[in-house]
């Protein structure tokens, strides 16, 4: 399993900047579009709903991924424990008392 790598400062800045510029550009374009105020408000609510849905989707995908990783870690730990138990029983069957003599 790969360790979690921290994001670089430049990546963090780029993600924040792209989010702010895309949302700001869309809202600015919405402000200057030649429509009635009710139509602008409707489109603005659509933009905000889309943004919050995207954030919720990103969080859900991340949570599912982390839960899947945790499930695999638990399964690997169980398998390791089982292998240690079987290995200990196998060593005991081959050379009884040898393991206790070493400790």
Image (spheres, helix red, strand yellow):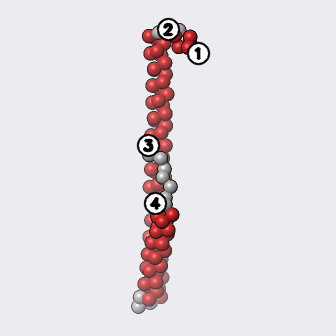
Report crowding for label 2: few under 14, some 14 to 19, many 20 or more residues within 10 A (C-alpha).
few
Q: Quadrant of the N terminus?
A: top left
**Residue 25: which quarter of the image?**
bottom left
Percent from the top left, x then y, of residue 66? 48, 49
In the depicted structure, whether residue 27 falls above or below residue 86: below
| Mark 4 nearby-residue class (10 Å; few <14, some 14–19, many ≥20) | few
Tags 2 and 3 in contact by the CB under 8 Å rule? no
Task: Read off the residue under disc 4.
Answer: 58
Looking at the picture, how far across and down is residue 29, in whole percent? 43, 84
The first of marks 4 and 3 along the sequence is 3
Q: First in sequence: mark 2 or mark 3?
A: 3
Which residue is labeled 2 in the image? 96
Asked whether the viewer can see residue 90, the reply is yes
Which residue is situated farthest in the left direction here? 34
Specify few, some or many for label 1: CA neighbours under 10 Å numbering under 14, 14-19, or 20 or more: few
The residues bearing labels 4 and 1 have C-alpha atoms spaced at a distance of 52 Å
Disc number lying in front (2 or 1): 1
Say which label, 3 or 1, has the lower sequence index.
Answer: 3
Query: Which residue was labeled with disc 3?
Result: 1
Residue found at x 45% / y 72%: 18
Residue placed under numbered mark 1 in the picture: 103
């Amino acid at each position: 399993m790969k360790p979690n790598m921290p994001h670089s400062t430049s990546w963090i800045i780029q993600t924040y900047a792209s989010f702010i510029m895309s949302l700001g550009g869309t809202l600015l374009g919405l402000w200057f579009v030649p429509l009635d105020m009710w139509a602008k408000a409707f489109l603005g609510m659509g933009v905000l709903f889309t943004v919050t849905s995207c954030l919720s989707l990103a969080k859900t995908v991340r949570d599912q991924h982390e839960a899947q990783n945790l499930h695999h870690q638990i399964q690997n730990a169980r398998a390791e424990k089982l292998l240690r138990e079987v290995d200990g029983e196998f060593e005991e069957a081959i050379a009884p008392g040898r393991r206790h003599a070493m400790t």
